[in-house]
Image (tube, rainbow, N blue to C red):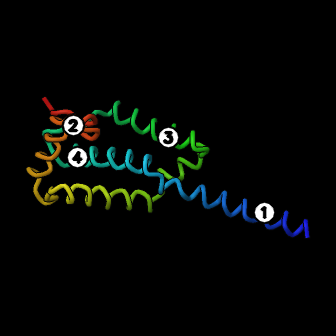
């Protein structure tokens, strides 16, 4: 009986560990930070008058990595998460949804630029990743 309990606990622990690792995508802090970085990147790509603050963006990505490491994820696991095509597709769709939910018509670059300029003016987390081109 004790052997069965020990085996059950080991199996539960193994399933729990696998499930805990899959929850990286569901971590609100990590996903929110990645979404902010993705929105800023899209704004800088789609608006000619806005540029990305590349060093600040890189620092934001490193902070996301540090948060994940503090949660116990290895560099390899973080790399797999970041490089996953499914995660990239999901992030791209959520980036567009975020902008649309904030009243941005993605078909009009003026609307995209206006949103980006407002983010910069209001010094939001997204705006802090952007700058107006000279």
Q: Quadrant of residue 116?
A: top left
Q: Tell me the residue that label 2 is attached to.
A: 51
Quadrant in which the C terminus is drawn = top left
Q: CA distance from mark 3 to mark 2?
A: 24 Å
Residue at position x 15%, y 50% from top?
112
Q: Position of residue 132 (x, y in %)?
A: 16, 33
Please tell me whether mark 4 sits on a helix, a strand or a loop.
helix
Q: Position of residue 52 (x, y in %)?
A: 26, 37
| 1 horizontally vs 45: left or right | right
Q: Earlier in the sequence, mark 2 or mark 4?
A: 4
Q: Position of residue 12 (x, y in %)?
A: 72, 64
| 25 horizontally vs 77: left or right | left
Residue at position x 87%, y 70% from top?
4
Q: Tell me the residue that label 1 is attached to.
A: 9
Other-residue count near label 3 (Cα within 10 Å), few / some / many at <14 / 14–19 / ≥20:
some
Q: Tell me the residue that label 3 is attached to.
A: 65
Residue at position x 76%, y 65% from top?
11
Q: Which mark is residue 45?
A: 4
Quadrant in which the N terminus is drawn = bottom right
Q: Earlier in the sequence, mark 3 or mark 2?
A: 2
Q: Which mark lies nearer to you, 3 or 2?
A: 3
Q: CA distance from mark 3 to mark 1?
A: 31 Å
Q: Which mark lies nearer to you, 2 or 1?
A: 1
25 and 8: which is toward the camera: 8
45 above or below 56?
A: below
Other-residue count near label 4 (Cα within 10 Å), few / some / many at <14 / 14–19 / ≥20:
few
Q: Earlier in the sequence, mark 2 or mark 1?
A: 1
Q: Earlier in the sequence, mark 4 or mark 3?
A: 4
Q: Which mark lies nearer to you, 3 or 1?
A: 1
Please tell me whether mark 1 sits on a helix, a strand or a loop.
helix
Q: Which mark lies nearer to you, 4 or 3?
A: 3
Other-residue count near label 2 (Cα within 10 Å), few / some / many at <14 / 14–19 / ≥20:
many
């Amino acid at each position: 009986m004790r052997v069965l309990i020990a085996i059950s606990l080991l199996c539960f622990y193994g399933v729990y560990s696998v499930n805990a690792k899959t929850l990286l995508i569901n971590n609100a802090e990590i996903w929110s930070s990645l979404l902010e970085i993705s929105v800023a990147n899209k704004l800088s790509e789609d608006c000619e008058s806005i540029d990305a603050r590349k060093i600040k963006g890189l620092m934001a990505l490193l902070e996301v990595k540090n948060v994940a490491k503090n949660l116990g994820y290895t560099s390899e696991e973080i790399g797999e998460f970041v490089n996953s095509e499914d995660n990239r597709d999901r992030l791209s769709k959520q980036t567009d949804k975020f902008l649309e939910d904030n009243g941005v018509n993605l078909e009009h670059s003026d609307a995209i630029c206006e949103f980006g300029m407002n983010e910069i003016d209001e010094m939001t987390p997204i705006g802090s990743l952007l700058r107006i081109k000279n």
